[in-house]
Image (cartoon, rainbow, N blue to C red):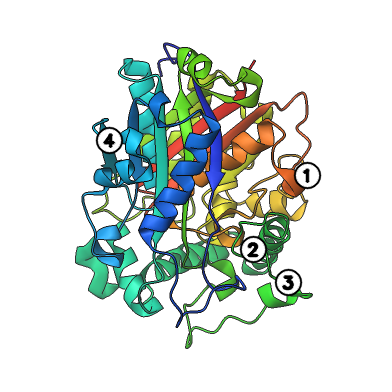
Amino acid sequence: MKALRKKVYMVAGYNTVSMGTGRKEFHPKKPRPDLEHYIKEAGQATLKMIGGAENVDEGVIGNFMASRFNKQANLPAFLPMIDEGLKYKPAISVEGACASGGLALASGIKSILAETADVVLAVGFEVQNTMKAMYGADVLAGAGWMKTRKEGHAYFFPGVFSNRAGAYYEKFGKEKTREAMAKWYCNAIENARLCETAQEFHNKNKDLEGTAKMPLNPKKFVDHLNYSDCSKVSDGASAIAIVSEEGLKNVGIDPKDAVEVVGIGQAASDITKEPENMTCLTTMKAAAAKAMEMAGITVDQIGTVEVHDCFSIAGIMGAEAIGFAEEGKGVDFVLEGHTSRCGKVPFNTTGGLIGWGHPTGATGVHQAVTIWEQLTGKAGDAQIEMKEDRPYGMTVNMGGDDKSLVAIVYKRGE
């Protein structure tokens, strides 16, 4: 894997609230912010931090299904809505299911490397609370191969990852795996309670473990997962600026207030084929390995990770795919406390997809914002201590059932 030919930074990250069930201000029968609101809020906040739209050369929007959730396409044309200064500047939109945000970051990084831009505004968003969950599940099924839709569960993707969880139980043992999945959920909610924009920020449940260990009920949901194992339906947006060294100077920001991208790995696998290994996220494993190889680091140098835990089993399997544990040993890694905010390598420090929320097109950008905050000391109550021997952060954004992956390695700017 070739090393990056020049330095690339990310700076000025911003997250809107991840809106949905769990937030006090959310009411399914009352009017809520639309996609225009979210794009504008996130975009304007980042522009304010980098000195305005005049400093931006290009823009990119990550989104999965606005064409169905909101009946809206032609998303690049929403960037000038953020600020008049973006009018007539190049803009594109990218889509790769739940990895759309990560692909927006990858697109911006490549523009910097191609020297077509010194400053790229990357915005990811999704507004999904526009229909009942059952209908939304059908829209989200588009992240998989639609020719298999009729063969799948009514809640298609919970069904897909329920099948993965069932295979994992059978191969490595159900009881300990369920214990680890419960701990993953508890960590997610505890972390989300420290982040004001998180969907579960208002969660006051005093018995998180009891909630996570509720008996499985296939008649009401899926065979091998509880509701607590799943990320929620979310509305929200995230934005960040991707800049060159010259761009960093142009926006007047010290490198120490930015994160440098030192490795990126993209990978895709055939959406028309079943997973080659039900208990291993093989495409994620490939993307993470590429990112670390480009960065010239090992997994032991990573100090914090934002992994795509659309389901708790995906978080555990993600820890294995990155290389923190062998296949089947991720449950022990979690149960031993290594992924908690005080552990060896804190995962998903603002709650991840289960705790912070999962506005699908925003998720990859949100992950980058979280790493930027942590590595530059801007995470507020959610701040963790970065260890000197583990100075790197990593994001892993997954689209579909391990089909479209973007992994990025970061370090604090110098």
In this rendering, which labeled residue sits more in front, label 1 or label 4? 4
Q: Mark 3 — residue?
A: 208
**Badge 2: residue crowd in 10 Å (few <14, some 14–19, many ≥20):** many
- Residue 363 numbered tag: none
Q: Position of residue 145 (x, y in %)?
A: 25, 59
Q: Amino acid at mark 4?
A: Lys
Amino acid residing under circle 1 = Gly
Residue placed at 71% from the left, 55% from the top? 191
Q: Residue at x 70, y 42 (%)?
A: 379
Q: Amino acid at mark 3?
A: Leu
Tag 1 and tag 4, C-beta contact below 8 Å? no
**Is label 3 in a helix, a strand or a loop?**
helix
Quarter the N terminus occupies: top left
Return the x and y of residue 86 as percentages of the image width and height.
32, 34
Residue for point 52% across, 14% down: 249
Point out the tag, 1 or 4, that comes first from the N-terminus: 4
- Where does label 1 land, which residue? 343
Of tags 2 and 4, the one toward the viewer is 4
Camera-nearest label, 2 or 3: 3
Residue corresponding to mark 2: 181
- Image depth: mark 3 or mark 4 in front: 4
**Which residue is rendered at x = 64% and y = 37% of the image?**
373
